[in-house]
Amino acid sequence: MELSLWTVASFAMSNILGLWLYGTRIADLYRSGRYNIMLTWRDGADRWPDRSRILSASLPVGVDVSGRNQVALDFLENLLPDGPTKASMALGARVHAEDTFALVGHFGADLAGAIRVAPAGEALDDGEPAYLPVSDAELAALLDGTDSAAFDFSHGAYRSTLAGFQPKLMVHRDQTG
């Protein structure tokens, strides 16, 4: 039975995360202890030959990873940025920077490659863009802002985990101006 620890207001998360590859849920991730992660393969992984290395050389398909082994943790940590970017992401998500499970659960919709992570029971975002209306003054403030403006978590918009990420501001002008 899945018990949810996730609340939108507190940025907590499910205790089970689904790991998706090319649109197929292939594994589940579980918190093990304070910061380690267990991985169990699902039937969706049958799409690839048993023991193939489609996800990682250290994670052969069909070989579950216990909480005593750091292979899943190491793999997921390497999908996240380091240093100040990771610290900013953790601050915005209201989790500890060393809590890879929470970070991947929060930012897993935008991982490198065809890998996506989402709390179990949640559908993957379809990727449709969303725009927030801003006034001319708000737009000017965003354009004049520091790099920290890129880490605006107030609307849940920041989701990038890509290393070397450079803040950008995307603007869409509609018929109302």
Image (cartoon, rainbow, N blue to C red):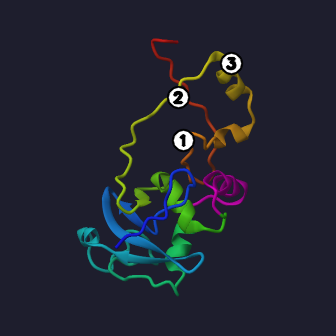
Q: Residues within 10 Å of mark 2 (few under 14, many from 20)?
A: few
The residues tagged by marks 3 and 2 sit, at their Cα atoms, a distance apart of 14 Å
The residues tagged by marks 2 and 1 sit, at their Cα atoms, a distance apart of 10 Å
What number of labels is visible? 3
Is 60 placed above or below 142 here?
below
Instruction: Say whether disc 1 or disc 3 marks the residue closer to the N-terminus.
Output: 3
Residue, disc 2: 132
Residue nearest the viewer, comparing 101 with 22: 101
Q: Is residue 106 visible?
A: yes
CB atoms at circles 2 and 1 under 8 Å apart?
yes
Q: Residue furthest top?
A: 176
Q: Secondary structure at mark 1?
A: loop
For the point 55% across and 49% down, which residue is it?
Answer: 160
Is 113 placed above or below 132 here?
below
Q: Secondary structure at mark 3?
A: helix
For the point 61% across and 44% down, which residue is it?
Answer: 153
Q: Which residues are magenta?
A: 79-95
Is 65 placed above or below 115 here?
below
Residue, disc 3: 137
Is-magenta flag for residue 82?
A: yes
Q: Residues within 10 Å of mark 1 (few under 14, many from 20)?
A: some
